[in-house]
Image: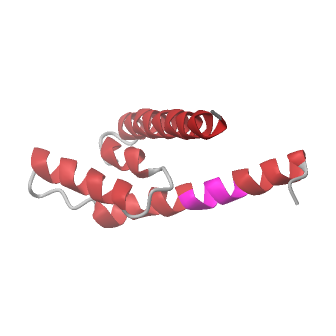
Amino acid sequence: GDTIKIVILGLVAFMFGTAAGVLFGKIMCVATGGKVNPLIGSAGVSAVPMAARVSQKVGAEADPTNFLLMHAMGPNVAGVIGTAVAAGTFMAIFGVM
């Protein structure tokens, strides 16, 4: 019961995180005149290094000269830091410790 709810909540959070990253990546692409590849936005979740590897793979399929892996690792690590900050905030608010 509760376990399924937690798993579903995690999946929903992952979907929103990925979607928001891609949307922000597109905004950054437009704002910089095409200098930022929107694919790196999808790596902004805390799944290291899989999210960055997926961005690299999809980018390379579209254009073999795309080398996005190291650029995608930046938002990937930032996602880990953001997750840790959010978890610490929630723990403080709800008095977990």
Q: Residue furthest left?
A: 64
- The residue positioned 29% from the left and 51% from the top of the image is 55
Q: State the quadrant of the N terminus.
A: top right
Q: Is residue 19 left or right of residue 94?
A: left
| Residue 73 lies within the magenta run | no
| Residue 88 rendering spot, x and y as whole percentages | 77, 57
| Residue 62 rendering spot, x and y as whole percentages | 12, 44
Q: Which residues are magenta?
A: 80-85
- The residue positioned 49% from the left and 40% from the top of the image is 14
Q: Residue furthest front?
A: 1
- The residue positioned 49% from the left and 37% from the top of the image is 11
> Is the residue 25 above or below the residue 73 in the image?
above
> Is the residue 20 above or below the residue 79 in the image?
above
Main SS category, magenta section: helix
| Residue 84 lies within the magenta run | yes
| Residue 8 rendering spot, x and y as whole percentages | 54, 34
Q: Is residue 91 left or right of residue 43?
A: right
Image-quadrant location for residue 74: bottom left
- The residue positioned 20% from the left and 49% from the top of the image is 59
Q: Is residue 88 left or right of residue 41?
A: right
Image-quadrant location for residue 51: bottom left
Along the viewing direction, whichever of 38 and 87 lies nearer the viewer: 87
Q: Is residue 91 left or right of residue 67?
A: right
| Residue 31 rendering spot, x and y as whole percentages | 42, 37
Along the viewing direction, whichever of 31 and 43 lies nearer the viewer: 43
Q: Total of numbered circles in the picture?
A: 0
Q: State the quadrant of the C terminus.
A: bottom right
Along the viewing direction, whichever of 45 and 74 lies nearer the viewer: 45
